[in-house]
Image: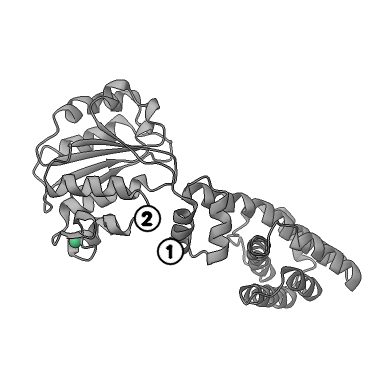
Amino acid sequence: MPFHQIIGHRRLLSLLSRAIARDTLPPSLLLAGPRGIGKRRTATAIATTLNCLRPAPIGALAMDACGECASCRRIARGVHPDVVVLAPGDSGSIKIDEVRDVLDRTHYRPFEGRRRVVIVDDADALVVPAQNAFLKTLEEPPSASVFVLVSSMPDALLSTVRSRCRPLRLGELAPTEVAEILVRDHQYAEADARAAAAEAGGSVGRALEAKGVDVAEAREAAQQMLRHAARVADPARRLDAAKDFAGKAATGSREREHLAVRLRALASLLRDLGLLAVRAETPSLANADLRVELTRLSAAFDGDRVTRAFGAVDRALAALERNAGPKVVADWLALQL
Ligand SMILES: [Zn+2]
């Protein structure tokens, strides 16, 4: 991603861009700042601009990548041989062997780019011996290499590592910037993005996580809805359950998003019930942790009922998108399950 496509951080980005244009970019950088604000993207933009085949000034930026040449595209896909990303694996840490491998490669000239860029994402996850292995290289980087350490907890790094890097601090994003990113990169509707951004403390990461928390709660609500529908046929009592399912949220747009998340959870459970209904040997369920509960529910939800219910959830989601009221949608759905 070129600099001009990054939302927010204008001052810092134009400073980086100018340093690249004048060839004064320090070879070891530490991008620090809260989680989920675009540090990794900024690191990638540095690598992209350094290696773009057609770099050019654009607007207030003294130099920026084109975003379209072969080099830009390979970096975006993560397959450029000279842009190396180190990040913690399943263990949650970055081991010394991984660091040694990367450092060995930096002794050679770049394969095809102008600069080799090593991005260390979550650099605070470097184990101490790995940090020590970096020290000499950070102090005297090989001439064609740039090291960009990225961290939301820079204080967890050894002071000897910190002191060898030029620190650059990225601040929180403005709520309008968070909303803009949610719409552009995460398919949020305008109103939902604004609502999510308002509570995200300037972090796209936090906005996305908040959505994740909703998912667990939404799945619980969806399970309850199915349990109730399996037991109760009386329409009046079905509508009581609908009231719980629609839930209570502060504003209209929040309420709609809230119900949409629950509906998607319901669709996911119904898809699993569909798999159980066709008696696949050991179907791989999306909600595998709920296998016992789902097997119990499958006694009431045979194939036909699952298909009808699934179609109803689909129509309910479409109605919500057309701005139907959440309460009306939930009521209607409760009678269809
Ligand atoms: Zn390019």
Q: Which image quadrant is residue 316 in? A: bottom right
Q: Which image quadrant is residue 295 in? A: bottom right
Q: Label 1 belongs to which residue?
A: 184
* Image x and y of residue 288, in percent: 62, 54
> Residue 127, relative to residue 109: is it above or below?
above
Q: Label 2 belongs to which residue?
A: 7
Relative placement, left or right, of 76 versus 138 is: right
Between the C-alphas of marks 2 and 1, the distance is 10 Å
> Residue 131, relative to residue 311: is it above or below?
above
* Image x and y of residue 128, in percent: 33, 23
* Image x and y of residue 8, in percent: 37, 52
- Helix, strand or loop under label 1: helix
Question: Which residue is at a point 22% across and 38% down the rendered structure image?
Answer: 147
Question: Which residue is at a point 79% across and 71% down the rendered structure image?
Answer: 331
- Helix, strand or loop under label 2: loop
- The answer to whether residue 66 is seen in the rendering is yes
Q: Nearer the viewer, mark 2 or mark 1?
A: 2
Say few, some or many: other residues with alpha carbon within 10 Å of mark 1 (under 14 / 14 to 19 / 20 or more). Answer: few
Q: Looking at the rendering, in which quadrant would you find the N terminus?
A: bottom left
